[in-house]
Image: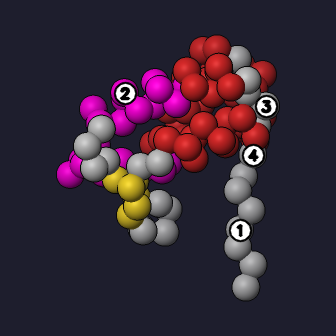
């Protein structure tokens, strides 16, 4: 996954960081094994849909949910309900 970039909702672009997916899944209740499985699936999928080596965070989230539903539907529902808090100013 050479130099894969991620476009965030606000338009910022940053390098793909598998740890963000892995940690988010674990924080939502996934076992380390489940989190690793889903993260690896996303890592394999992302380069296949990247445009100019960039994939959107919304697409990543959708795919995480799809893979998670396949191994733990209850956890997928909890992950889907989670919304990252908006930064306060």
Residue placed under numbered mark 1 in the picture: 86
Side of 46 relative to 84 (left or right) = left
Q: Marks 3 and 2, how far apart in space?
A: 23 Å
User: Which residues fall within the magenta stretch?
Assistant: 38-58
Q: Is residue 6 visible?
A: yes
| Lower position in the chain sequence, tag 4 or tag 2 | 2
Residue 40 forms part of the magenta stretch: yes
Main secondary structure along the magenta-highlighted residues: helix
Q: Marks 1 and 2, how far apart in space?
A: 29 Å
Residue placed under numbered mark 3 in the picture: 29
| Lower position in the chain sequence, tag 3 or tag 2 | 3
Q: Quadrant of the C terminus?
A: bottom right
Q: Is there CB contact under 8 Å for labels 4 and 2?
A: no
Q: Marks 4 and 1, how far apart in space?
A: 12 Å
Q: Marks 4 and 2, how far apart in space?
A: 24 Å
Q: Nearer the viewer, mark 1 or mark 2?
A: 2
Establish if 11 lies above or below 31.
below
| Lower position in the chain sequence, tag 1 or tag 2 | 2
| Lower position in the chain sequence, tag 3 or tag 1 | 3
Q: Marks 3 and 1, how far apart in space?
A: 21 Å
Side of 34 relative to 53 (left or right) = right
State the residue at coordinates (60%, 15%). 70
Q: Quadrant of the N terminus?
A: top left
Q: How is the image coloured?
A: secondary structure
Residue placed under numbered mark 4 in the picture: 82
Q: Which mark is residue 44?
A: 2
Q: Is there CB contact under 8 Å for labels 3 and 4?
A: no
State the residue at coordinates (47%, 26%). 40
Q: Nearer the viewer, mark 4 or mark 2?
A: 2
Label 4 residue SS: loop
């Amino acid at each position: 996954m050479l130099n894969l970039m991620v476009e965030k909702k606000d338009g910022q672009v940053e390098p793909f960081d598998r740890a963000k997916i892995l940690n988010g899944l674990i924080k939502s209740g996934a076992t380390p094994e489940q989190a690793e499985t889903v993260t690896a699936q996303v890592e394999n999928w992302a380069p296949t849909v990247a445009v100019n080596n960039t994939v959107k965070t919304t697409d990543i989230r959708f795919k995480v949910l799809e893979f998670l539903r396949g191994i733990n539907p209850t956890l997928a529902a909890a992950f889907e309900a989670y919304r990252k808090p908006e930064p306060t100013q």
